[in-house]
Image (cartoon, grey):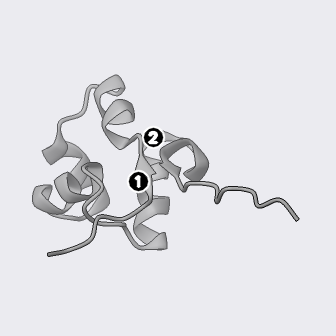
Amino acid sequence: MVKPTRVSNSIRVFREDAGMTQAELARTIGVTRQTLIAIEQGRYSPTLELAFQIARAFGAGLDDLFQYPTPPRTED
């Protein structure tokens, strides 16, 4: 069983706000719709290059689209 990535994203929100379908965004960034679905659902982390392509498709920054959990702070 594949362990889900800890990277989360807001791609679906940006895509829907832009009025794009999954197929349209997938075509724009050069991947299959199935790959985009896996990325949106957090089952697959895109390469850095693909992450930039997704961000550029929306005119957004990487931090706007992708989130990585901050590790809990330990007390010394």
Q: Where is residue 66 in the image (x, y as percent from the top left)?
A: 49, 51
Of the 4 image quadrants, the one containing the N terminus is: bottom left
Residue 16: quarter of image? top left
Q: Closest to the observer: 11 or 49? A: 11
Q: What residue type is labelled 1?
A: Ile
Q: Where is residue 75 in the image (x, y as percent from the top left)?
A: 83, 59
Q: Closest to the observer: 9 or 27? A: 9
Residues at circles 1 and 2 in contact by the CB criterion of under 8 Å: yes
| Residue position for label 2 | 58
Q: Which residue is drawn at 39% across and 33% down?
A: 14
Element under disc 2: helix
Number of the label disc, if any, that sits on residue 54: 1
Q: Is residue 25 left or right of residue 51?
A: left
Q: Closest to the observer: 9 or 14? A: 9
Element under disc 1: helix
Q: Residues within 10 Å of mark 1 (few under 14, many from 20)?
A: many
Residue 47: quarter of image? bottom left
13 shown above or below 11: above
Q: What residue type is labelled 2?
A: Phe
Question: How far is disc 1 from disc 2 in space, using C-alphas?
Answer: 7 Å
Q: Residues within 10 Å of mark 2 (few under 14, many from 20)?
A: some
Q: Closest to the observer: 14 or 19? A: 14
